[in-house]
Amino acid sequence: MAKIIHHLFGNNKKQHLRVRSHLVSASPELVSIKPANEIKVEDVTEHAQVSRDTFFKCFRSVDDLLNVSAKQAGRELTSPIALMGSTILDVPMRMAAKTRMGIRLLTGTPLLGRLMLKSEWPFTDMQHKGYLDIKKDIAQGIEQGCFTEMPPEIAANLVMIALRGAIQEMLDSPQPQDYEDQVIYHMLLSLGINAETAEGISKIPLEQLPDLPKKGLVGKILKIVA
Amino acid sequence: MQNTLIFSVLALSSEKSIHEIDVDDVIQHAQVSRGSFYKYFPSVQASVLALVSQLARELTTEIEAITHQIPDTATRLVVTTKLTMRFLVKVPLLGNFLIQLPWPSQNQDVNVFKHISADVEQGIKEGVFTKMPASIGCNLLIGSLMGGVHTMLGKPASSNGYENKVLSPVLMGLGLDSKTADELLKVPMPSLPKLPATGLLGKIAVMNDSVS
């Protein structure tokens, strides 16, 4: 049995946060060992060398831990994608390109994609950096009249559905070569872009992918798969 | 006995996440021994799956009894989806459980909305919707449905007409023009099915009655 090196006794907040982030940073290895759905509390406690009691002081369940980790990885990916997207002035084109970057990065590193799929659905973290970034593009698109006026959470969901759906389907089974294009096309239609424009935009190839962060959870996953 | 156990899982799912329910919770709620639980299920996860397939069966039966006579695929899809959303919000125990299920998932065992996916697929085949891999249309619809139910459960007061706001972009995404989509969303809605006397839904009815 592994030695327990992290143990929470009292209510020391600082220590609590430290162990919490220690557990989050252990999740890349965990998802690389076995499918996310099969990870048990024992796997986490053994791998991260914490007691069961300590684990439950930080997270309610393995799913809770993976959701927090997935959202953390999502935050790390938001900046590079948003930065590269910011060079595209046309809102629908930017939306399409950024969604495509997300799909490409997450299916390109399946381990990362699998972790991201452990984030909650329906998404409730309205202050999440990635969510706010999507909302900002949508608000601009609605303001400019290119997207249909609709409640922001409905529109943001449409983008996240395209992303999640594509990642899940592409990771689970071989899809037609233009699957990504079609996902983008239907996302644009749902946002209110007319068929002709949507078709044109959905065929624009992605010129460049942003570099993935070297640090954080994403960096850790890249090191594992390297 | 099996129904008693999975009903306990359902009842517990509104108090904590389905990933956090353990055997102790279930046997305490159902007031049975640990041995009885394990006689029926190897794990809580297995009991959740049994609950899902039972609910899928019952829910589909109730909704389809109303919608199966609608000949037009797109109309049937819209009415079915709206009825399903309303039903899940009207019976929060059901809604709160179903929106916790993993999505998207290729595991057909956890797809409660097979009756809706089937209509999306048929609509694509008939050319009512754009030709596309069925998974794209199904994900768009089911993902939106779950998101919509979640929002409606959170603020029921403002949920009037919210289904249409959710569904309108979905129909456009499936390739309908906005005029057709609007007309479909205006189709008069049949009233919600009453909870039946039997099965898990029957147990919910009994519980609701004792509360009110």
Image (cartoon, helix red, strand yellow):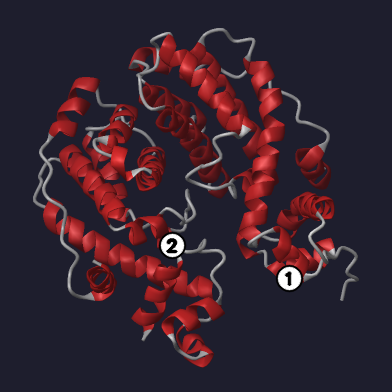
Can you tell which quarter of the image residue B180 is in? top left
Please say if B198 is above or below A91. Answer: below
Residue B112: x %, y % from top left: 35, 58
Horizontal placement of A94 versus A17: left or right? left
- Residue on which disc 1 sits: A42
Please say if A15 is above or below A163. Answer: below
Residue A214: x %, y % from top left: 83, 33
Give the amino acid type for the residue marked by disc 1 in the picture. Glu
- Asked which secondary structure carries label 1, the reply is helix
Horizontal placement of B145 versus A179: left or right? left
Q: CA distance from mark 2 to mark 1?
A: 26 Å
Q: What chain is tagged by disc 2?
A: B
Horizontal placement of B186 versus A1: left or right? left
- Residue on which disc 2 sits: B14
- Asked which secondary structure carries label 2, the reply is loop
- Position of the N terminus of chain A, as image quadrant, is bottom right
Mark 2 vs mark 1, foreground winner is 2
Name the residue located 30 percent from the left edge and 37 percent from the top edge.
B158
Residue B3: x %, y % from top left: 34, 79
- Position of the C terminus of chain A, as image quadrant, is top right
Give the amino acid type for the residue marked by disc 2 in the picture. Ser
Residue A47: x %, y % from top left: 81, 63
Frontmost residue, B131 versus B184: B184
Name the residue located 13 percent from the left edge and 59 percent from the top edge.
B65
Can you tell which quarter of the image residue B123 is in? top left
